[in-house]
Amino acid sequence: MKIGLERIREGVVVIGLNGRLDAAAAREVQECLEEAFAGGSTNLVVDLSKVSFIDSTGLGTLVSGLKVARRAEGDVRLVAPNSQVRKLLQLTTLDRVFRVSDSLAEV
Amino acid sequence: MDVSTPMPALFIQPHYDDVPLSCGGTVALMAEHGGSPHMVTVFAGELVDEMVGEFAAWKHSRWKVSDPDQVQAVRRAEDAAAARALGCDVRWLGLPDAIYRGDRYSSDSELFGALRGEELELAAHLAEEIRHLPEWRDGARVFVPLGVGAHVDHQLVFEAGRHLAALGIEVYAYEDCPYAVHTPEGVAARLAVLGHAVGEPFPVPIGAMLERRLEAIACYESQVPVIFRFTTDFRRAIADFADARGGADGPAERFWPVRPRE
C-alpha cells in the first residue's frame, strides 16, 4: 500500500492511502497514524479515494486511530470511500462511529 | 478427514477461546504432524464509546467490565498463550461483536436467536477476508463453529464457512463447547435448523492431545470460572465429553462437513 501524509493546517493531517487496506497493510497504516499523532496532530483526515478494498483488520486500524484521536479531543474523518468500503462500514455499523465526507473539499 | 498429512488449516473462532474449547486437540494434533494450523479470532475489534449501546452497557455491568481496553489486552494475551499451547499462532480480525453492531441485537433472546438478514452479507465479506489473509494457502482446510447454542456470532461464522464451501474449499464445522457439554440437546436443535447444510458427523481421535487442549483452555484464566460455572472441575467435564465422543477409540472431537448454500 502507498501512503502519503500531508499537514494541511495546524493540528490537521491528511493521510492518503492507495491500494488494499487489509491485514497485510494494516501495520504500515497503523505506524503512519502513530507518526501523525506523535507529530502533534489530533485531527486526521483519511483519504480513501484510492483504496480499492478494506477488510475488518483495516477498519480496526482506523478505529484504533479514532480512539487515540478522541483521547486528545480530536477526530479521524474518512473521505471518499468507495462502495465496498461504505458497505463494510454499514455492515459493521461503524458508519455510526466515523464522520464520512464525499471529498476533501468538505473537510 | 486425515489429520496426519501435513496440510494448511485455518481454525476460525468467533470469540477468543472458542477453538481451544471446542477442538483444541485437533489443532494440536495437526501441529504435531507438521501441518501449519492457524487460529483466527473474528470478533476482536476495538471499541469506541458510540459502539456501546444500552444492551452492551448492560452486558458490561453484568460482566463487571469497567475498562474494555484492559479486558481486551487480557483476552488477547490469553488467546496468544492458548495458541502457543496448541503449537500454532493466532490472528485477530477487527469485526465488532454482535452486541456492538448497533441495535441489531438488543436482548439475550435476540443474541441467541435468528441471524439478521443483513448479517448474511457480513458473512460473505468475512469469507472473502479469510481467503485473503496472509496465512491463507491453496488447499487450506477451514474449520468453523457448528453454531450450537445459536449465538449469532457463531451462526455468522458458520455462514462464512458455507460461502467458502461454495468455492470448493474443504470446510468443517466443530462442535461448540462448552454449549454442547452443558446443553447436549442444543446439538440436535442446531442440526434440525441446519438440515442439509452439513453432512454426517465424524470423530477425530485426539489421544494424548487432550492434555494440550486442557492446557490451552486453562490459559483463559479470566474466563474459565465463567464458562465452566456449571462444574467445579472443567478438566473432568471436557475429558468426559471427549471420551464420550470417541468411545472405544479414546478421546475425540467431532466435526461435520459443511455444504455450500444451494
Image (cartoon, rainbow, N blue to C red):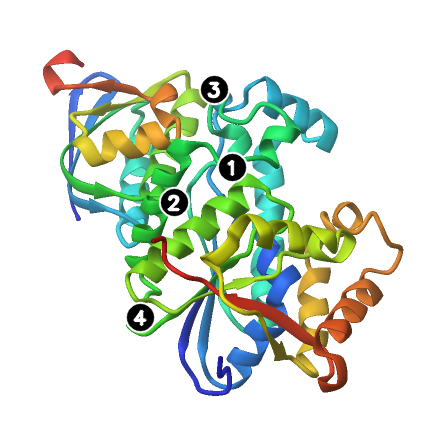
What residue sits right under mark 2 in the picture? B123
Tell me the element at label 2: helix
Q: Is residue A44 visible?
A: yes
Tell me the element at label 4: loop
* Above or below: residue B52 compared with residue B131: above
Q: Nearer the viewer, residue A30 or B95?
A: B95
Cα gap from disc 1 to disc 2, whole angstroms = 13 Å
Q: Nearer the viewer, mark 3 or mark 4?
A: 4
What residue sits right under mark 1 in the picture? B97
**Comes first in the chain, label 1 or label 2:** 1
Residue positioned 78% across, 53% down in the render: B182
- The answer to whether A99 appears left or right of B215 in the picture is left
Q: Nearer the viewer, residue B197 or B225?
A: B197
Residue positioned 73% across, 61% down in the render: B218
Q: Nearer the viewer, mark 4 or mark 2?
A: 2
Q: Nearer the viewer, mark 3 or mark 2?
A: 2
